[in-house]
Amino acid sequence: MSRTVAEGFDEFLSRLTPLSSQISAAKSHRDRVERSLKKSLSVLNIRETGSFHHGTGVRHYSDVDVLVSLGGTQPSSSDTALRWVKDALSASFPTTTVRISRPAVVVEFASGAETWEVIPGFLQDTSPHFRYEIPGPSTGWIDTAPTEHLDYVNECNQAAARGGAKKLARLVKAWKYYCNVPVSSFYLEMRAAQHMATEPSFIAVWDLCLLLEWLQDYQLPAMNDPKGVTGRFHPCSSDYLKSEALSKLTTAATRARKAFDAYQADRIDDAFIWLDRLFGGHFPAR
């Protein structure tokens, strides 16, 4: 079927969106996870914080992310909090794989077809923002303000025509997953929102090219919290992984530019070829 580049992106975004059956399955597990945690731990609140809940998840790749606000005294070691959560979930789901993968405890329902990441947190402030400390990527504790950051993406999404911030976030995360790029999904989402905050409209082939080229030009720089609540957002958990991510980013930016140049020159077949290469062979055929 012959189609335009815009129609190709519409089809691709539809394929990336989690199925209603997956969303229903996740909702059915929430009560079980919540009961499991409350059975063994002092739980003040449970918040769904990730892209699956927020409308930027990628089908078959995005986990259900939950922040569990724990009561009582915060342990000096975040490893202790992770063990508490793991032990509670393992007791309730003895035949399910439950493992620690910082900063979360991962629960692999349906042999991994549905994955939950449960992050323990301790509330630090409530005014003017809800700020928590959660396990760091390798050790210790770091600050997070999930509600504020989700609000930021929503604000940028409303500013850009046709919900461009969330669409761009879903696209750049699809690139990450399909090409095995070791970069933080949260970082990519915040950068996508930041890019779209001042754009009057969303043109997928153009905005994706601009974002990837900007990330390459500035070498995946750490990002200041746009809400000013927490510290800086880092793209990767180590310098080694950042080097690998930058190598793949260079290839992606080149392919995105070739796709956009072909689009501008009305060489639509070529644009589809370069977009398919950009997304590791997953972009719809023309």
Image: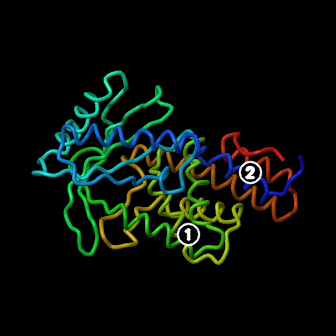
Q: Which residue is mark 2?
A: 11
Q: The residue tagged with tag 2: helix, strand or loop?
A: helix
Q: Position of residue 131 (x, y in %)?
A: 26, 64
Image vertical order of residue 268 relative to residue 191, above or below: above
Image vertical order of residue 137 relative to residue 55, above or below: above
Q: Earlier in the sequence, mark 1 or mark 2?
A: 2
Q: The residue tagged with tag 1: helix, strand or loop?
A: helix
Would you say 85 lies left or right of 280 here?
left
- CB within 8 Å, label 1 to label 2: no
The structure residue drawn at horizontal position 43% and vertical position 52%, both measured from the top left corner, is 50
For disc 2, the neighbor class at 10 Å (few under 14, some 14 to 19, many from 20) is some
The structure residue drawn at horizontal position 37% and vertical position 25%, both measured from the top left corner, is 96
The number of discs equals 2
Q: Which residue is mark 1?
A: 157
Would you say 79 lies left or right of 137 here?
left
Q: Position of residue 202 (x, y in %)?
A: 67, 69
Q: Position of residue 109 (x, y in %)?
A: 43, 31
Q: Position of residue 28 (x, y in %)?
A: 44, 40
- Which of these two is toward me, 247 or 67? 67
The structure residue drawn at horizontal position 52% and vertical position 66%, both measured from the top left corner, is 193
Residue 123 lies in what quarter of the image? bottom left
Instruction: Measure the alpha-carbon separation of dots 1 and 2.
Output: 20 Å
